[in-house]
Amino acid sequence: GSGRTATAVIPVSLMGHDDDAGLSAEEIVFSVLDPRGGFISRSKDYGHDPSQPTFLLAAGHDLGTYVIEATNAIGDLVGSATFEVGGSWDDESAGPPLAIWSAGGPDDYAPGWSPPDDDPNGPCSPQWTRYSPKRGTRTVGVVFVDTSSSRLSSADVKQAAVEWEQHLFTGVPGEPGPPSMSKYYREVSSDKLKIEGKVVRDKHGDPIVVKLPKGWKQNFYWEKKSEHWYANGSFAASVVALSKESVNYRKYDFVIFVVKSGSESQFVWPTNYGWERVDYEGKGLLPEHTEIGVNVMPLDHEKRVGKRIYATAAHEIGHSLQLPDLYEPELWGSDYKGRSVGGWDLMAQSARIPQFALPHQIALGWIPSTKIKCIRHQPGALKQEVVSLHPSAWATYQPSPLNYSAVEIRLGERSNYLVELRKSQLPTQYVTDQNLPSDPAILITEVGILDTPRFVFAPERGDGPVLTSVGDTFGDGGGSTTSSPLGMRIYALDIQGGEILIETGTSKVPELSIREWDKSYHSPDLFVRNARNWNGSTWINAEWRYDVFGDNPNRVVASFLNEGNLDAPQVGVRFEYTRAGANEKWQPIGSIVYRDVAQLSSVEFVSDEWIPDPGELLPDAHYCVRARIVGSGDGFYSVPGTNPPIRELTKSNNSARSNFQRMISATSSPSSRVAQFLEIGNPTDREQIVYIKLRQTNPLYRSYLGASWFRMDAFESRDVLVMSEFAGTDDSGALLMDEFRFEPNRVIVEAYLGPGELDSIELIGGNQIEVVEGLAVQFQRFAAVASGNEVVVSGDLRVKSGGAVPPGGSIILTIDTEGKLENRTIPLSQGSFITTLPREGWDAVRAYFLPPPGYADVTSKTVLRP
């Protein structure tokens, strides 16, 4: 099975049979009798001590007391122990570890982007469309929760169940619509997404109440900045553990835990807590699991919060659909102050339940790409185009075959303006958009300005970003194409009819860009070259191209595109690295690299040589690399020597990061458990809970996380251990599932900032570790022997189990000369290699086996120059 784990010492009492005297750990098989109780891994990790052998126990997914048995080689029982899986967690500083033995997880919060157009001069296709569509039906379960500080009576919960089902699903009697969370989503998605559900009841029809055994302050904490109570880090896991027998969470996509307040001053603030994994017993060895979006709201919501239940619930379910808050917290920085879209989008202001603004509707797949007019800045003569907009809220309810629902104006790679027509809706027909102006307005938002999938109002230019009258314009200098650095203006011709004129001019400007990391946490334009992936001209092992090569020389390569119609001379790029984590203490890699980037071309920038220092951590640190354009004081690249300065269109796509590591779980008897420390940081100036989420892609592996959350002081950093092992065979060695045999396991670890300024947990960073399985290999011999004026360096490798010769691969010799490292790649033939080095001029050498698929890598001991 899989589930949350705790560190403990469980002594197994051996029964003292004479025949079993002197049994070694290798000769004893430990097992949990009931798979619901968990599993014991025999994999050896980096800290394995043969003199004091230990094995990892992962507590299972059902509460109860379970038995561990120890048997000898012929299956005789030689010892036993018991342990209990409980439903609460008492540590207030760090959350329970996590073990996963199945694949899958929620979609990424970060949306995908279209690749660059093949022809920068040709027609453009909308970029903001490659997001996981949210269509069909999503089911919500409502579960009531109380604490020992304040229990719910049977009468109170029955009355509350009626009220909550009306607000969420059936409609509030006596109000126009009638309004409900379900009706909101039917309207805003034009029936593409249906949110259905119910209050979860027992077999007698009574609402289920999860009774937490401890009081209010043991389950919730007071956040001083926002002055609100929030759920503790393990709240959702505890509620799920205590209710899994009575609530079938497999029926629900999202849950709302409705919590009885503790006192007049104690009520939980409505908040989304991301995703909770729920495991169930599977049909075979692998468990089944589901992922549920968790939302928490107070029972007496309207009294405490001052909003209608359906309005807040619609907003929180928006988070479960992976939409971020559009408030203006301090952590956004001053660049975005005053640019929140406010009452134009539910995720910015929910009280009057406005519809989602255009970027969210497109991202959720509710506006077809054929209804998005795409316009690109192109070199050449003045261009003018009249576009008729259909109100985005009417996209399918009142379809217009001729008009567009949106205009995308391409500023550069992954940076756009989106233009839409909005107006208030009739209360007799709609429950949404009641608080918008009664007259139509042209709304202009900027997309791609942040590293997260947020959007903001376009900058205030001319009469924009909201055009309300005929003749209103959006553009620098009142919209003049001759003075605007964008060479563009939007002109309102007919507000009632949604007719606008979009004018792009002859301004010649550069536009530099690099693609930021995608859902895998590496940029397609940012690589690392080193001796195990690059031969000086081509990739020799492309699967290693994002990975930093330990304490060996690396060069970071960044590809920058100039989409503009003007050359960009002397573009400066700074390369940096940090230990993977949220605080991002970036350190420079060499000096700034300068290159010219011609218009409509792409140029590679290559860093100076970089040798990471893993420090004293075991295992080695996980690194993130970054490349960014070093601009002027305002962050824009400007053409040198121009006055007034000619600068690029946008600075929002001038930086990219890659954060990736590849490891091999070596299989012999048993497989090794590979491990990595990741740094998790609190980037704020106050105490916060930082949540850590783990998922993997291959069910033939088991992955582990050292802690599922940390309570951290201001700007504090903590290390979390991440481990993964190949576990894809049964006791006889047969594969569990052939179709995953040669697929790598991609382990994704993400950090989320606890609620405070926002009413949801906030994605602040992520890491990817790719783990592959391979036969364990060892150096049988590695030596450096003086021979005349040379030193002969040679060695032999064999598979650990059985002694077979590896069928291929190569050897990378790392030669140390007073701390300066040089790599030399030599071939491997029949498991052996030999080469010569000079008699003088170096100090030490070691060998690294770069394996073929199906085999593990290995590093030799270091040998001094003879």
Image: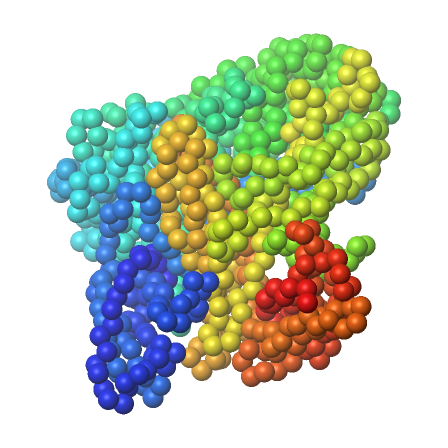
Number of marks present in the image shown? 0
Quadrant containing the C terminus in the rendered view: bottom right
Q: Position of residue 687 (x, y in %)?
A: 36, 32
Residue 829 seen anywhere in this rendered image of the structure: yes
Percent x, y of residue 401: 66, 34
Quadrant of residue 127 within the rendered picture: top right
Q: Determine whether 70 is above or below 742 in the image.
A: below
Identity of the residue drawn at 46% across and 58% down: 723
Image quadrant assignment for residue 823: bottom right
Nearest to the observer: residue 561 or residue 797: 797
Q: Position of residue 420 (x, y in %)?
A: 61, 25
- Residue at 43%, 49% (x, y): give it: 720
- Residue 48 on image: x %, y %: 42, 66
Q: Is residue 478 above or below residue 160?
A: above
Instruction: Compare residues 820 and 270 and report the one nearer the observer.
Output: 820
Q: Residue at x 72, y 58 (%)?
A: 842
Location of residue 335 with respect to 717 vertically, above or below: above
Q: Nearer the viewer, residue 484 or 727?
A: 727
Side of 752 relative to 143 (left or right): right
- Locate the N terminus by quadrant: bottom left
Q: Is residue 528 visible?
A: no
Decide if residue 267 is on the left or right side of residue 564: left
Q: Is residue 728 left or right of residue 820?
A: left
Q: Residue at x 23, y 56 (%)?
A: 86
